[in-house]
Image (spheres, rainbow, N blue to C red):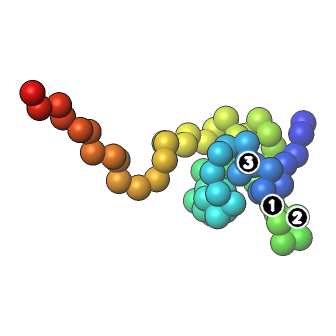
Amino acid sequence: MKLLGTKEAAEKLGVSLRRVQQLIEQKTLPAQRIGRDYLIQEKDLNKVTIHGKAGRPAKVKSEKN
């Protein structure tokens, strides 16, 4: 059982630290609060689905001949 801090979890998930904190607040990502930080079991990272890059999708350029 490997425990990760929020920073390490963010790096492994490829998201920001704030996004990991939001996932914990939404109870999507299980975590244990120790002092003022959270510890997350590495196996629990699989329970979170990350949907690509945030923001509006890029426009598809159409080819005109």
Q: Position of residue 29 (x, y in %)?
A: 66, 50
Q: Position of residue 31 (x, y in %)?
A: 76, 54
Q: Confirm whether residue 27 shows in the render.
A: no
- Label 1, on which residue? 38
Residue 53 is labelled as none
**Badge 1 amino acid:** Tyr
Q: Earlier in the sequence, mark 2 or mark 3?
A: 3
Q: Position of residue 35 (x, y in %)?
A: 89, 70
Quadrant hosting residue 47: top right
Q: Are marks 1 and 2 in contact (CB under 8 Å)?
A: yes
Residue 43 lies left or right of residue 58; in this view the side is right
Q: Secondary structure at mark 3?
A: helix
Check the image and name the residue furthest to the front: 65
Q: Position of residue 6 (x, y in %)?
A: 77, 57
- Label 3, on which residue? 11
At x 61%, y 42%, the residue is 48
The front one of 30 and 7 is: 7
**Badge 3 amino acid:** Glu
Q: Disc 1 to disc 3, how far (Cα)? A: 15 Å
The local crowd at label 3, few if under 14, some if 14 to 19, many if 20 or more residues have their Cα within 10 Å, is: few
